[in-house]
Image (cartoon, helix red, strand yellow):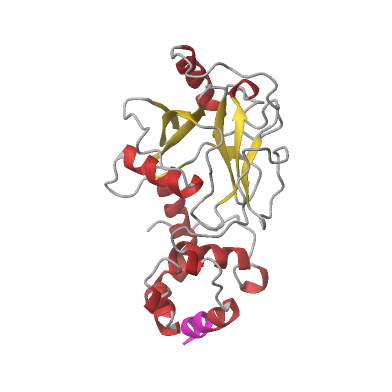
Amino acid sequence: MSGLHRSSSPPLKNGHPPQELLDDLCSRFVLNVPKEDQQSFERILFLVDCDVLRPYVAHIDDLFKDFTDYKVRVPVTGAIILDKTYELCILVKGWKGTSWSFPRGKKNKDEEDHACAIREVLEETGFDVSGLLNKDEYIEVIFGQQRVRLYIISGVKDDTAFAPLTKKEISEIAWHRLDDLQPATSEVISHGITGLKLYMVAPFLASLKSWVSKHSVPVPPRSGLPRKGICVWKANNSSTGSNSSPSTKFTSNANSIDTGPGKSFRNFRFDSAAILRALEAGFSA
C-alpha cells in the first residue's frame, strides 16, 4: 500500500460517527440479515467484527479512497419512465440534498443491465417495469469512468401509484414535464428552468427528446399541465425541502398501511450509544 493519504473530510463530532450515518448503515446492512440475528446483540456485533476491522484502522484513509475509486467505476442502470403522452417523466429525489434523477442504481456482481434496472426502479419507486422494458431501448452516457444506462419505459399511466421500497433513500417522487427540463449545459446541469438540480438528468435529455420525436404518441398531449413537478409520493420525515408543487390527483398516500417487503423492520432502531461503547471497548482491548 502506498504512503498514507490524509482525508480532507471534516473530523467526526466527539470522535463518533453521526447518528444519520449509523442509521443508514443499520438500514442498509444490519436490517437485511435474518430475523434471528437481529434478536441477538452478540450477532449484531459479529456483523461489525472488531477483530476483523482492527488491523485496518491505521489505513482507513487509503481504504476509503480505494472504495470511492471503485464505487465510481461500477456501472449504473435504471429507467426513464414516460407517461402515455410522452410529456411527463418520473424523477426521484434523494433522501438528502436537493438533486433529482431518474430512478437508477449500481449493478451487483454478474448482474445483467436490464435486471439491475428492474431491481433498482422497483426499490426506488415501487413500480415493476419488467413487463414494459425493451432491452434494445435505452440511452447510455459515460460519466468519467462510470457507464450509466437508462432503459426507456413508455406508456405508463399518470395515476400509477409510486412509493419506494427502501428506507431513507428516496424523499420524493414526481412527474416532471420534459419541456421544462433542459439538455446539458454548464448552467442547466446545476439548475434547470424550474430550479431543479438536474446533474444526473440533463445529460440524457437531448437523446430522450430525439427518441420521443421518432415515436408516435399513444395519447394526444394535454394542455394546462403545471410547470413544476406533480408530486406522487413524499416522505414525511425527510430532512430535505421539496421542489415540487403540492400533490395533485395523482398523489398516493404516504401514510397508507405498509404492506411492502420488510414492513416489520422499518420502525426498528438500534441503541446506537450501546453499540458505540461496545465498538470502542473492542478497539481498545
Q: Quadrant of residue 251?
A: top right
Query: Could you say which quadrant of the image residue 101 lies in?
Result: top right
Determine the residue positioned at 71% across, 32% down.
195
Does the magenta stretch mainly form a helix, a strand or a loop?
Answer: helix
* Range drawn in magenta: 278-285
Residue 38: % across, % down: 43, 77
Q: Is residue 140 left or right of residue 91?
A: left
Which image quadrant: the N terminus? Answer: bottom left
Residue reaching furthest to the left:
110
Q: Is residue 142 left or right of residue 178?
A: left
Q: Position of residue 73 (x, y in %)?
A: 40, 42
x and y percentages locating residue 23 in the rendered image: 56, 66
- In the picture shown, does residue 199 fall above or below 218? below
From this view, report whether residue 72 is shown above or below residue 5.
above
Residue closest to the eye, 148 or 128: 128
Q: Between residue 220 and residue 78, name the one nearer to us.
A: 220
Does residue 74 show up?
Answer: no
Q: Quadrant of residue 271?
A: bottom right
Q: Residue at x 45, y 13 (%)?
A: 216
**Closer to the camera in the image, 143 or 149:** 149
In the rendered image, the vertical position of residue 84 relative to residue 67, given as above or below: above
Number of marks in the rendered image: 0
In the image, what residue occupies the spot 44% across and 65% down? 29
| Rendered location of residue 255, percent (x, y) | 62, 57
